[in-house]
Amino acid sequence: MALFGNKKADKAEEKQAPTNRKTAVPVMTERNLTTVLRRPHITEKAFAQSQQGVYTFEIDSQATKFDVIAAVKAVYDVTPKKVNIVRMRPRVVRSMMRKHASKQSGLKKAYVYLQAGDTISFM
């Protein structure tokens, strides 16, 4: 049977062809960069970190690190050294005094680390 080949082995090789390859998500185009950064996230912690060159932004839920880097370059004319993204989940907050429950909406934040000497002005 070696002369004619092994039909089962040939079929197995055909089935092993990659079917589900992960492809890179394309970076948003220039016209969509304005929707990546929603607003700066201003809190006491964010203000303290801004003194050290770390700025916090609320971003679009579909945005990636590469989108944030491109948006910061386009809007603020600075090049980020590093970007970290955090997703805050929505949660229910209860007031024991008023017996009232309210829902806090979730959001996605980006911590943008700038090189020494670079700053971003929000005013």
Image (cartoon, grey):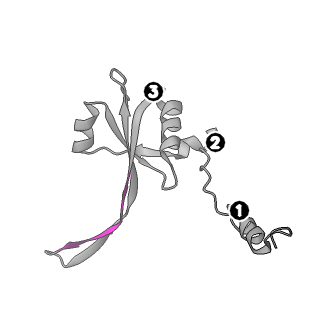
Name which residue lies at 36% across and 34% down: 113
Quadrant hosting residue 119: top left
| Disc 1 to disc 2, C-alpha distance | 33 Å
Q: Which residue is label 2 attached to?
A: 29
Q: Which residues are magenta?
A: 86-95
**Callout 1 touching callout 2 (CB < 8 Å):** no
The residue type indicated by label 3 comes to Val
Depth check, mark 1 against mark 2: the one in front is 1
Classed neighbour count for the residue bearing mark 3: other residues with Cα under 10 Å, few (<14), some (14–19), many (≥20): some
Q: Residue at x 48, y 41 (%)?
A: 68
According to the image, label 3 marks what residue? 78
Which is nearer the N-term, disc 1 or disc 3? 1
Q: Give coordinates of residue 38: x percent, y percent.
A: 46, 47
Q: Amino acid at mark 1?
A: Ala
| Residue at 19%, 79% in the rendered image | 99
Q: Is residue 10 left or right of residue 52?
A: right
Quadrant in the picture for residue 39: top left
Circles 1, 3 touching at the beta carbon (< 8 Å): no
| Residue 37 seen in this snapshot | yes
Residue 58: horizontal and vertical position, in percent?
40, 48
How much space separates mark 1 and mark 3, taking CA atoms? 44 Å
Horizontally, is 1 left or right of 98 in the view? right
For marks 1 and 2, the one nearer the N-term is 1
Residue 2, by quadrant, is bottom right
SS at circle 2: loop
Quarter of the picture containing the C terminus is top left
- Residue for badge 1: 17
Q: Nearer the viewer, residue 111 or 90?
A: 111
Reading the chain from its start, which is encountered first: label 3 or label 2?
2
List the single residue furthest toward the left.
97
The secondary element bearing badge 1 is classed as loop
Quote the CA–CA distance across marks 3 and 2: 19 Å
